[in-house]
């Protein structure tokens, strides 16, 4: 992998990577504190809009399957969507882009974890067919008898997402250090 990263590195491009990484750190903290109803961050709202669209479209595509699969389709495809983008960026050797997508995986898992944690109290506003849309996680956790674990599972999902975000930032920092070493060694 290290040989594949080797490209023409200039001090100017290195500064670009450093500034972008600092913006990624800022994005990490924005994701960490994100609540759609309170956010004025245009990038995160756009990412949320995409996530929400993929989530809801997945329910429609799963129509006709058993109810538990329809309920689960939203989060499965929502997460699979960003994981596939992450795989694509890594396969294309766009390693610094994969740092951003790693943060997007964090964002997705934080949104899913928040939705999971809401299964019992059902405070989050829901959008769906009819006047009383079904809360996916209330249905899923009730189906498996795990409703009393909603906050535990939701928090664990968010922690895993946060860990992925941290690993993405560490990978980005490693890329910068690697590029600095490339400039210093002819």
Image (tube, grey):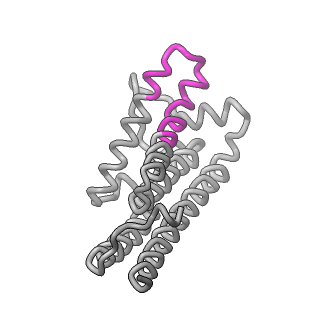
Q: Which residue lies most toward the top here?
A: 64
Place of residue 61 in the rendered image (x, y in percent of width and height, measured from the top left): 45, 21
Is residue 72 one of those drawn in magenta? yes
Left or right? Give the position of 61 relative to 72.
left
Residue 33 appears left or right of 170: left
Is 6 in front, or is 98? Answer: 6
Helix, strand or loop: magenta stretch: helix
Task: Name the residue furthest right.
Answer: 145
Q: Residue at x 63, y 51 (%)?
A: 151
| Residue situated in front as seen by the camera: 127 or 48 | 48
Measured as percent of width and height from the top left, residue 144 is found at 71, 33
Residue 124 in picture, x, y percent from top left: 45, 45
At a point 44% along the width and 35% down the height, the residue shown is: 55
Task: Give residue 12's position: percent from left, percent from top.
Answer: 26, 78
Q: What stretch is highlighted in magenta?
A: 58-80
From the viewer's perspective, is residue 180 above or below residue 39?
Answer: below
């Amino acid at each position: 992998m290290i040989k594949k990263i080797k490209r023409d590195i200039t001090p100017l491009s290195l500064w670009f990577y450093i500034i972008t990484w600092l913006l990624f750190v800022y994005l990490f903290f924005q994701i960490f504190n994100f609540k759609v109803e309170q956010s004025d961050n245009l990038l995160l709202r756009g990412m949320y809009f995409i996530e929400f669209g993929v989530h809801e479209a997945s329910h429609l595509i799963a129509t006709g399957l058993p109810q538990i699969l329809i309920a689960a389709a939203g989060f499965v495809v929502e997460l699979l969507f960003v994981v596939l983008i992450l795989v694509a960026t890594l396969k294309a050797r766009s390693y610094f882009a994969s740092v951003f997508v790693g943060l997007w995986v964090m964002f997705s898992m934080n949104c899913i974890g928040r939705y999971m944690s809401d299964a019992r109290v059902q405070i989050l506003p829901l959008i769906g067919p009819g006047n009383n849309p079904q809360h996916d996680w209330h249905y899923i956790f009730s189906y498996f008898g795990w409703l009393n674990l909603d906050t535990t599972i939701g928090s664990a999902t968010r922690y895993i997402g946060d860990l992925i975000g941290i690993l993405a930032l560490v990978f980005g920092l490693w890329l910068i250090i690697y590029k600095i070493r490339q400039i210093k060694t002819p």
